[in-house]
Amino acid sequence: MRNTVAIIIALALIGYLAYSFKGSVVPPDANAAPKLAFVTNGVADFWVLAGKGVQDSASEIGVDASFHMPPDGLADQKRIIEDLMVKGVDGIAVSPIDPVNQTPFLDRIAEQTLLITHDSDAPDSKRICFVGVDNYEAGRMCGELVEEALPNGGKVAIFVGRLEQDNARLRRQGVIDQILGREWDSSRYDKPGEKIAGNGFEVVATLTDQFDMAKGKANVEDILSRHDDIAGCIGLFAYNTPLILEALEQSGRSGKVKVISFDEDERTLQGIIDGTVHGTIVQNPYEYGAASMRLLKALTSGDRSGIPENGIFKVPARTIRKAEVESFREDMRKKLGK
């Protein structure tokens, strides 16, 4: 079974030929193995690392673990979770796509099984805890990279998959608050379309793509077309920066516009090495998967000792610049078995 899991993850790495895998390391009494599930918010290279964390942790702690990447957004995520409930899963870790509108649904799930969130929280739901970075803090860290790359300020654009997600909203606000020199306040929210300027910076737009790669690239092309003087492009989801790099290269502006990133896509890391990306803020998706399995396994036996009092299992974010990128990439590849 472990070989089957590895094969399916490899297929996901090649081209998302599989959107989920299932694997387990089962004790002699198969009925004693908790059935746990890890559900992402979409399909992206970022999640392959999380899947490896799920796989490795399942092998270590003896659980029946499944991993799911919904390709079609909110409705597909809901369908996956409902199917898991029918199958009698003992615990679910999910990255909610639209936490505000999903809260009633998540509450119903939490009444029937153990529920935690990861990557992006649903703080008003009945989930037991959240596993992930402080996304507002990580956004401010990204803002610091913007300030480094553009010490004299300038016009910048922000690119992200969705703003319905808690993590996207908080990251974006953290970036804005940092470059505008504001006090820390994670409850603040600048609506897209409002004039956002100060401290030498102007955020000309925040553009979303709903995980549509063609739309994501078109968003960058639109900004480059409308703003000859754009100084920086900021990608808040893992796939955004590679799309930014493609658009810049095809427009002949590679190296002329500063690129600041989130997450550890291989193309982003290569961009840091090549000098086309200033730096990136990385999470630890591998640990999201591994920690989620460990916490849920403990919860199935009534052990809540691993749950922090505030309900936030913090996985620290890191800043990766040129000096750190080679060692970071080597470590990431080892985790993926490359």
Image (cartoon, grey):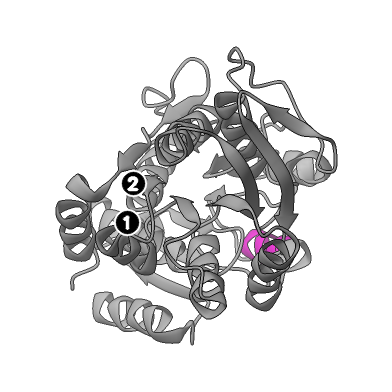
> Up-down: is 66 above or below 10?
above
Q: Residue at x 54, y 65 (%)?
A: 244
Between 118 and 212, the one lying in front of the other is 212
> How far across and how far down the image is residue 156, in percent?
62, 46
Q: Nearer the viewer, residue 285 or 300?
A: 285
Chain part drawn in magenta: 77-86
- Amino acid at pointer 2: Glu
Q: Main secondary structure of the magenta part?
A: helix
Q: Is residue 71 visible?
A: no
Q: Position of residue 57 (x, y in %)?
A: 28, 53
Q: Which residue is mark 2?
A: 287
53 left or right of 45? Answer: left
Name the residue rendered at 61%, 58% in the picture: 41
Disc number at residue 53? 1
Instruction: Give neighbour class at mark 2: few <14, some 14-19, many 20+ (Cα, 10 Å).
Output: many
Mark sitting on residue 271:
none
- Percent across and percent down for residue 211 are 66, 67
Q: Is residue 99 magenta?
A: no
> Which image quadrant is residue 224 in?
bottom right
Q: Earlier in the sequence, mark 1 or mark 2?
A: 1
Q: Residue at x 50, y 57 (%)?
A: 257
In the image, 136 versus 78, the foreground residue is 136
Question: How packed is label 1: few (under 14 Cα within 10 Å), some, or many (20 or more)?
Answer: many
Marks 1 and 2, how far apart in space? 6 Å
Whether residue 80 is in magenta: the answer is yes
Classify residue 28 by image quadrant. bottom left
Q: Is residue 176 visible?
A: yes
